[in-house]
Amino acid sequence: FAALLEKVAALPGLKRLRYVTPHPKDMGPEDVAAFANIPQLCPRLHLPLQAGSDAVLKRMGRKYDSARYLELVASLRDARPDIALSTDIIVGFPGETEEDFMDTYRLVEEVGYSQVFTFIYSKREGTPAAEMDDDTPREVIQERFDRLVDLVQRKAFEANQAELGATVPVLVEGTSKRDDSILAGKSPKNQTVHAPVPSGTEAASLVGRIVPVTIEEARTWYLSGTIAHA
C-alpha cells in the first residue's frame, strides 16, 4: 500500500493525497513511514479504535489491544508530529462495564483526537454480538455516552487552538451554506475553514484552488480567518 501511495503521489500536479480508515491491525511500519516520506500525503488519518478496553476489543474480535493501538499512534506522531487523528467509538457494547468504559475514556483523553465519531451500540441480527447477554440499563449507557461526547468536544477544541495565528493552506470547496460571501474549504488536516470572499473576487474563481488563510478564530468544529492573498 505504501508503494501505491508513492506512485499516486508521483502523478504530475498532485498537491494533496489522503486516505482513510486503515484497520489498526494491518497498518505496518512502511505505511507509517509514508507520512514522513511523501510530502503530498496529508497529515490526517482516520484510525478506528471502537473501544479502549482490551476485554471489549477481544469480544469485538478486533485483533489488537490498547497497547498496540497506542504504539501505532506514537509511531505516527513520530513520523508526522502534526498529524491529526480521528476515530470511531462504540459505547455500550454488550457486557461493557464502567471500568471498560473508563479504559476507553482515558485512551481518548490520552490520544487527543481531532474528531471522534461516537455511537451507542445497536444490535444487528446475525452478528456474534447479537447473541451476547447485556443487562446494562439504557440510562447508564446514555450517561457514559454523554460523558464521552463532552470529552471529545473538549479535546477537539483544544486541538484546533494550535492553529490560531497560523497561515493554513486551504483547498476551497465552495461557499458556506449559510452565507455565500463566506468561502468554505479544507485544511491539510481536513479541518473545515471559513474565510470571507476577498473584495473584488468571484467566489467561483477560487473553487478548487489552494489559498493561504490566516486563522483568527478556532472553534470546536471549524476554523475561520482571512485569506492572506488569493
Image: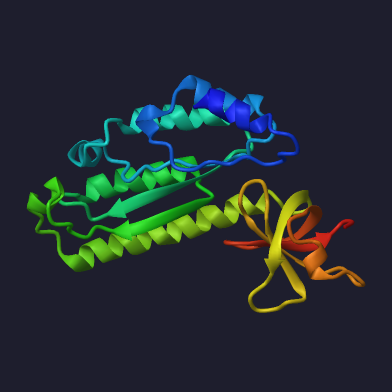
Which residue occupies the extreme front position in the image?
A: 12
Give how far across and how far down residue 206 sits, in percent: 80, 61
Q: Quadrant of residue 117?
A: bottom left
Quadrant housing the C terminus = bottom right
Label count reads 0
Which residue is found at the position 71% from the left and 54% from the top? 171
Residue at 21% of width from left, 52% of height from top?
Answer: 93
Please tell me in which quadrant of the rendered image residue 150 appears: bottom left
At 68% from the left edge and 29% from the top edge, which residue is drawn?
A: 10
The x and y percentages for residue 96 are 19, 49
Q: Residue at x 63, y 26 (%)?
A: 36
Q: In x, y percent, where is residue 6?
A: 61, 26
Against 166, residue 122 (above or below) is: below
In the image as oriented, which residue stretches furthest toward the right? Answer: 200
Q: Nearer the viewer, residue 155 or 43?
A: 43
In this rendering, the answer to whether 12 lies above or below 191 is: above
Classify residue 59 as left or right of residue 50: left
Q: Is residue 224 left or right of residue 100?
A: right
Out of 109 and 175, give the one closest to the viewer: 175
| Residue reaching furthest to the top | 29
